Each structure stands twice: as structure tokens, then as C-alpha cells.
């Protein structure tokens, strides 16, 4: 029987401080998209070593981050939360926002010549290309504003998970987060019950799963076939501190984020 390599997952990036013994030990990059920022955006920014805005995501940082600090001067917040890079086709960012961050030293890369990939794709490709191969296994890209708004945008963001299936990428909104569980691995998911859950789901997008098995869920799967037009594990419940997943197909894992 084929022994699959173990891949571990944890949402410790939602905690105020990441425990030193957190499994796995990851380096975070943050990409901000042009949707409403989650309330915990400053926390993601704090944990990230590299911060990118995808085109109009810079407008969101400029406009909305000061609203999360109502007792501070907006100009101070804008200077404190300066992205390292703004990248995209530049059809959404306002000129005054671009000029403001450029004056602070933010690098601006106009890729309007490329209309075949999304702004998120462009940002992920940049992070991949500037990360040494030895560090890629410890890299996790957090994507704020990835869910909500137009469904075709959401579908494009989910497609990026599949286009870069060898990278850890987590799509976030105020309500939940989504990540790909590649079929090449078995998965241990450590639940941060203070900030996430209990509602969750395992969703086969792109192709059916002929066999998926889990532990740690209210309604576990046991070599179960899941597919659109048949059974899809939505509105499931995590029961404890760890969920395990093994499947013959790539699956999307999603779990709710608690409103704190």
C-alpha cells in the first residue's frame, strides 16, 4: 500500500501571536485583493514578512485600515501599513493611492499587458519567483478579500489554488477561509477552536473524488465518493482539536472563522 507523505495545517495566523511550537512552522506573505478587508487584517499584516496589494487592493488598505483604528490619525495608519509591492493590471487603483504609496517607497509593477491571468495570479507568481526553492515548503500565502463580491472573481481566486497546487495558499474573508488539500498528501488539520469552527466542509472542485476518508468530523467520510451532482460534505462540524483527511482527489477545505 502506498504510504503518502503527511502535510500538516494550522490556522495559527489567526491568533494574536503564533506559538513557537506551532505545527507547521511557516513564513507568511500577505496579498490584499479589492474586496472589503476582514476585521483581522492588521493581524495578518503583523504576521506577514512580505505584503502585496493586488491592484485595487491598495485602495482597500488606504481607505479601510484607518477605519479599524478609529482613535488614531488616518495618515499615521496609512504610513504604518505600507505595502511592499503593488502589482496588477492597474485598472482599479486610484492615482492618488498609487502616488501616495510610491512616495513612501512601495514598488509598483504595472502588468496591464497581461490580460490572461488575474491580479492574484500575478502576485502569487511574483512571490513564488522571489522565494528560494529551499524556503518554498515553509511559505504560506494569505489572501485577504478573496471571497465575497462577484462570483466569477471568487472562482478565479479558487482557480489560483489549483494553478499553484504546490504552494500553500489560503483564501480569507471575515466569515471563513479556504485552502487546497492536494491528493499527493494525507493531511492533519489542527483546529484553533478559539478562532475558527465548528462549521466546515470538504469540496471536490474540478473532478470527483472516488474515495475520501476523514476523522475528527461530526459526519466522517469512510472511503466515500464525493462529487457535484452527488454527495458534497458541506455544513459539517469539527469535533475536536484535529481533523485528518485522505483522498484520491484534490479537495477544498473550508472552515468558519468566529466573529470575535
Image (cartoon, rainbow, N blue to C red):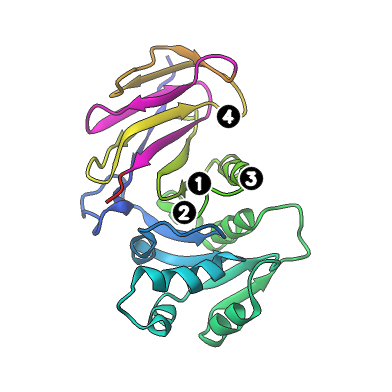
Q: Residues within 10 Å of mark 1 (few under 14, many from 20)?
A: some
Q: Gap in Å between the C-alphas at discs 1 and 4?
A: 17 Å
Q: Look at the numbered disc 1 and give the secondary structure of its residue.
A: loop
Q: Gap in Å between the C-alphas at discs 1 and 3?
A: 17 Å
For disc 1, the marked residue is 167
Q: Residue at x 49, y 20 (%)?
A: 232
Tag shown at residue 224: none
Residue 59 image offset from top left, x and y in percent: 55, 70
Q: Gap in Å between the C-alphas at discs 2 and 3?
A: 16 Å
Residue 100 image offset from top left, x and y in percent: 55, 84
**Magenta residues (range):** 229-257
For disc 3, the marked residue is 156
Q: Which one is closest to the eye, mark 1 or mark 2?
A: 2
**Toward which corner of the image does residue 8 lie, by quadrant?**
top left
In the depicted view, which residue is nearer to us: 239 or 38?
Answer: 38
For disc 2, the marked residue is 141
**Toward which corner of the image does residue 176 lie, by quadrant?**
top left
Sooner in the amino-acid sequence: mark 2 or mark 4? 2
Residue 64 image offset from top left, x and y in percent: 46, 68
Sooner in the amino-acid sequence: mark 2 or mark 3? 2
Sooner in the amino-acid sequence: mark 1 or mark 3? 3
For disc 4, the marked residue is 205
**Toward which corner of the image does residue 66 lie, by quadrant?**
bottom left
Image height check: is 209 above or below 106? above
Drawn side of residue 171 relative to residue 218, left or right? right
In the depicted view, which residue is nearer to us: 52 or 184?
Answer: 52
Q: Residue at x 62, y 41 (%)?
A: 155
Q: Gap in Å between the C-alphas at discs 2 and 4?
A: 21 Å
Image height check: is 114 above or below 184? below
Badge 1 vs badge 4, beta-carbon distance below 8 Å: no
Badge 1 vs badge 2, beta-carbon distance below 8 Å: yes
Q: Residues within 10 Å of mark 2 (few under 14, many from 20)?
A: many
Amino acid at each position: 500500500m502506498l504510504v503518502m507523505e503527511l502535510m500538516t495545517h494550522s490556522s495559527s495566523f489567526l491568533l494574536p501571536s503564533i506559538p513557537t511550537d506551532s505545527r507547521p512552522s511557516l513564513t507568511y506573505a500577505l496579498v490584499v485583493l479589492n474586496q472589503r478587508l476582514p476585521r483581522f487584517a492588521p493581524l495578518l499584516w503583523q504576521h506577514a514578512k512580505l505584503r502585496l496589494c493586488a491592484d485595487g487592493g491598495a485602495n482597500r488598505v488606504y481607505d479601510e485600515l484607518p477605519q479599524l483604528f478609529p482613535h488614531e490619525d488616518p495618515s499615521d495608519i496609512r504610513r504604518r501599513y505600507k505595502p511592499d509591492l503593488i502589482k496588477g493590471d492597474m485598472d482599479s487603483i486610484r492615482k492618488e493611492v498609487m502616488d501616495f504609496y510610491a512616495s513612501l517607497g512601495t514598488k509598483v509593477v504595472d502588468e496591464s499587458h497581461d490580460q490572461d491571468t488575474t491580479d492574484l495570479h500575478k502576485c502569487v507568481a511574483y512571490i513564488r519567483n522571489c522565494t528560494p526553492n529551499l524556503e518554498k515548503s515553509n511559505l504560506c500565502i494569505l489572501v485577504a478579500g478573496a471571497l465575497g463580491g462577484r462570483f466569477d472573481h471568487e472562482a478565479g481566486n479558487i482557480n489560483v489554488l489549483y494553478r499553484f497546487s504546490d504552494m500553500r495558499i489560503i483564501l480569507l474573508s471575515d466569515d471563513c477561509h479556504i485552502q487546497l488539500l492536494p491528493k499527493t498528501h494525507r493531511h492533519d488539520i489542527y483546529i484553533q477552536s478559539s478562532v475558527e469552527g465548528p462549521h466546515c466542509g470538504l469540496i471536490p472542485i474540478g473532478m470527483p473524488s472516488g474515495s475520501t476518508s476523514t476523522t475528527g468530523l461530526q459526519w466522517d467520510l469512510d472511503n466515500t465518493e464525493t462529487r457535484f451532482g452527488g454527495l458534497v460534505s458541506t455544513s459539517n462540524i469539527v469535533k475536536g482539536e484535529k481533523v485528518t483527511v485522505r483522498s484520491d482527489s484534490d479537495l477544498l477545505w473550508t472552515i468558519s472563522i468566529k466573529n470575535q
